[in-house]
Each structure stands twice: as structure tokens, then as C-alpha cells.
Amino acid sequence: MFLFPGSFEVGGVGLRAFLVGILAFVLLFWGPLLGGGWARSYVIALPIAFWFVLAYVWRVWQPDAAAEDQLQRTVAAAVGGAFLLSAILLLESADFTQAFILLAFVLFAFVYPHIGLDGGLPRG
């Protein structure tokens, strides 16, 4: 019950899963790769620790659905903006494949908070 206090709807673990997924994505693609073996365990350990920290923060803060929805939209806009800036910078280089992948993540970051709201696609 501590890890999953609600459903994957707004007011549940949707925003926390989104934040942990973004952290894992950043660690996988832009994190420093230290040697081999156990030195790369930070890719697994940091998102797990971040999940537990967010679960504690949500238990203490207890946001209502409107506050969590607003926070999710703000975080998604910031992530989408960062991806868009990275894609624009990559378009100036010779590698267009990474730029188009980042543009796909921009689309996901801007669409994700709106899924399931106002009769849209169901969430979860």
C-alpha cells in the first residue's frame, strides 16, 4: 500500500512513474558510463531510490487530483521543452536520427498529461 496508494489515474502513481521514467531515460542516454559491471548499477539504483523518495513525498504531501494534474503538466512541459531544445541543437549537427528521436519524445512529453482528460484516450 505504501508504493501504490492509488491507481494509475491522476491522484495515483502516474506522475511518479513519469518522473522515474524520465530519470531512467536521462541516466541511460546522458549519464556517465563508469567502467563495467557493478559500476553501472546507478542506472537501476537511482530510479528505485527516486521512486521511494517520491512515494514518501506523496504520502506526506497528499496532493489532491487537481494539484497533481497541474504539477504533471508543468513537469511534462519542462521535459518537452528540454527535449525540443536538444533536438534543435542536434538538427544543427550531422546526426539527424537522434534529433528525430528527441522530437518523438517531445511529442510524447506534451501529449502524455492530456491522455484521459476531457473524454480523450483512457489513462493507464
Image (spheres, rainbow, N blue to C red):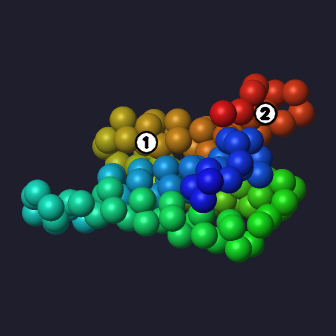
Q: Residue type at mark 1: give it.
A: Ala
Q: Depth check: give the residue in front, 76 or 93.
A: 76
* Residue depicted at x 74% and y 41%: 9
Q: Quadrant of the C terminus?
A: top right
Q: CA distance from mark 2 to mark 1?
A: 28 Å
**Image-quadrant location for residue 61:** bottom right
Q: Depth check: give the residue in front, 28 or 103.
A: 28
Q: Inspect this view and state whether residue 60 appears.
A: yes
| Left or right of 110 in this view: 79 | left
Q: Residue type at mark 2: give it.
A: Gly
> Element at badge 2?
loop
* Residue depicted at x 29% and y 64%: 42
> Element at badge 1?
helix
Nearer to us: label 2 or label 1: 2
User: Mark 1 — residue?
Assistant: 99
Q: Inspect this view and state whether residue 79 appears.
A: no
- The picture places residue 23, in percent across and down from the top left corner, at 46, 58
| Left or right of 16 in this view: 33 | left
- The picture places residue 13, in percent across and down from the top left corner, at 65, 50
- The picture places residue 30, in percent across and down from the top left corner, at 34, 58
Residue 120 lies, with reference to residue 88, above or below; the image says above
* Residue depicted at x 32% and y 41%: 95
User: Mark 2 — residue?
Assistant: 116
